[in-house]
Image (cartoon, coloured by chain):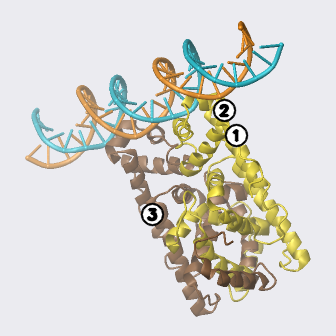
Chain colours: A brown, B yellow, C cyan, D orange
DNA sequence: ATCAGCATTGAACAACTGTTTAGTGTTTGA
DNA sequence: TCAAACACTAAACAGTTGTTCAATGCTGAT
């Protein structure tokens, strides 16, 4: 499945070790020394190859983005992020580090995280357009906002994987906490909501619509007297 | 709205400064010296009052949990987490620090984050039960898993607020990025999905159900030959 | 064989980290 | 009024951090 041939250079080994540690411990907690040790190399060599810790991180950003960008581009299935994660889980250990890394990038202010989020939203919006045309997805007025909501919901599993596994008592694979057992437990409840909805009728939707229409005079200000 | 009388002791000032910096920069990036400086105090005094940086964090955990636990306990409305955030946004600056702090706690392995997540799930499940009884929420077979999904979706706004504001071009209040403008843009699309669903029919749900039933012989193992 | 250009290391450096300590006022209770 | 307890600071300490540097080995072209 991994299309690019494995890179066995020392530089690549350092970078992969960094991806692993950055993903597991976060960028500030993971030290250059720990990365060097994990790669079986001296701290000086890490700097020699990447200039600085920031440079190392940038190289990791680029590599992880390149790895994930090629994935699942042409899939027409909806909730493709979930499908994508499913794919990952067919080769759990192979992509586990990248998943954890992306989670850190999304949480911590980062250009790579921004790029990844935007890519997921764009991909989701494409899927929605295709689904509307095919008649499988409802014809939403604002496909962009809808895509943002769907993407955000999907990515919440990535951000909260540890908690989901914890409360559902599922096996939580290191370092991201998202395992097959978790997906098996959450797929149906999520699809249930996405298929038949959460509410029985449009009461809450209508109420919100009214409230928001009233609110148009009140942009920005909150405490109306 | 804030029930507990403001605490002006130096200890409380240090704790509040720590909540602000921990929430904005994360626990490892925020230093004892930065907290002390923000509180207008010497680093030694921070340790004098809280024993250690870990002790300071524990005090922050307790305080933030106590602040949020009293909120929105008896609300019967569904998607109460979103409502809760709405409430917060009526007093944006007042709870902004706590929101950012909880976001960090949820991302970073932490007992306080665990407790908060569990509280949100429990509250969501209570709301689902009440809604089913009242006939406003569909009668889900597995209310616990459904509650986990809904809670996760709701918290995605907290975890990804910065990205949501960014891609939607909304004003992103520091330090958590969730503002009234963002909520106004996302409320209807989210409620739309929760009311009428995302798909036009049960095709995907049925397919997933079949796939999962077939999969029962394959627990744990993945690469079937 | 030789030399240039690398990859690589070990040791050191300066800055920063959490924490300690000794000391100084300031409050408080007997 | 006195002394004990407390709030607080400045300085220093030891450990960790990212980074530098001189030295060493190695490889490949000449």
Residue located at (51% from left, 49% from top): A22
SS for callout 1:
helix
Q: Are marks 3 and 1 on the same chain?
A: no
Say whether residue A106 is left or right of residue C11: right
Residue located at (45% from left, 63% from top): A65
Instruction: Looking at the picture, tell me which residue is in the foreground, A131 or B165.
Output: B165
For the N terminus of chain B, the quadrant is bottom right
Compare marks 2 and 1 and give the one earlier in the sequence.
2
Which marked residue is nearer to the observer: mark 2 or mark 3? 2
Label 3 marks which chain's residue?
A: A
Q: Is residue B166 above or below residue B204?
A: above
Asked if labels 3 and 2 touch by Cβ distance under 8 angstroms, the answer is no
Label 2 marks which chain's residue?
A: B
Residue matched to label 1: B59
Residue B94 in view (yes/no): yes
Residue matched to label 3: A65
Label 1 marks which chain's residue?
A: B
SS for callout 2:
helix
Q: Is residue B120 above or below residue B12?
A: below
Q: Which mark is residue B50?
A: 2
């Amino acid at each position: 499945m991994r299309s690019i041939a494995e890179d066995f250079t020392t530089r690549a080994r350092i970078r992969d070790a960094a991806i692993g540690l950055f993903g597991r411990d976060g960028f500030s907690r993971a030290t250059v020394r720990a990365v060097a040790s994990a790669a079986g190399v001296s701290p000086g060599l890490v700097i020699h190859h990447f200039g600085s810790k920031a440079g190392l991180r940038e190289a990791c950003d680029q590599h992880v983005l390149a790895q994930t960008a090629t994935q699942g581009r042409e899939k027409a299935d909806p909730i493709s992020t979930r499908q994508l994660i499913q794919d990952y889980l067919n080769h759990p250990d192979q992509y586990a580090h990248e998943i954890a890394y992306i989670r850190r990038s999304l949480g911590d202010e980062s250009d790579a995280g921004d790029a990844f989020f935007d890519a997921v939203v764009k991909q989701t919006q494409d899927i929605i357009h295709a689904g509307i045309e095919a008649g499988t997805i409802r014809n939403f007025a604002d496909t962009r906002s809808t895509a943002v909501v769907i993407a955000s919901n999907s990515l919440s599993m990535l951000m909260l994987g540890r908690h989901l596994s914890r409360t559902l008592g599922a096996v939580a694979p290191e370092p991201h906490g998202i395992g097959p057992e978790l997906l098996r437990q959450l797929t149906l409840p999520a699809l249930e909501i996405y298929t038949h909805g959460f509410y029985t009728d449009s009461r809450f939707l209508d109420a919100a619509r009214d409230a928001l229409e009233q609110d148009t005079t009140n942009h920005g200000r909150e405490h109306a007297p």
